[in-house]
Image (cartoon, grey):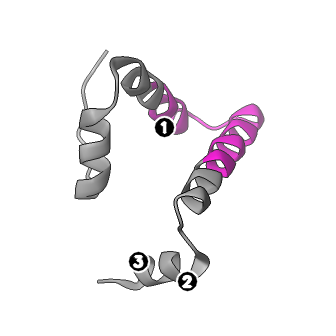
Amino acid sequence: MSEITIEVSTEVAEAYRSASPEARKQIQAIVSLLLQKPMDSDVAFLRKIMDGISDRAEARGLTPEILESILSEP
């Protein structure tokens, strides 16, 4: 395995650092899959992951308005 560095927000970095070793492995596996050559099954897998992320964000109070505000920040 090789190590790479990606830029993320401070909150994401802190969440990753505080995640359990098992959660970190799962995150690493997801990133690996996302960066490999896409296939139809990968697209379906990505949609499932994105739906889960969306559900978690909504459960934590993220609204479309808040998301738009975050995305429009310089």
Residue depicted at x 33% and y 31%:
19
Lower sequence index among marks 1 and 2: 1
Instruction: Write down the region rendered in magenta.
Output: 29-52
Quick check: can you spot residue 61?
A: yes
Q: Which residue matches tag 1?
A: 35
Neighbourhood count class around disc 1 (C-alpha, 10 Å): few under 14, some 14–19, many 20 upward: few
Residue 45 is situated, as x and y percent measured from the top left of the image, at 70, 36
Residue 72 is situated, as x and y percent measured from the top left of the image, at 41, 84
* Drawn side of residue 50 relative to residue 32, left or right: right
- Which of the numbered marks, if any, corresponds to residue 18? none
**Residue 45 lies in magenta, yes or no?**
yes
Residue 67 is situated, as x and y percent measured from the top left of the image, at 50, 75
Q: Which residue matches tag 2?
A: 65
Amino acid marked by disc 1: Leu
In this view, 64 is above or below 13: below
> Which SS class for mark 1?
helix
Q: Which residue matches tag 3?
A: 70
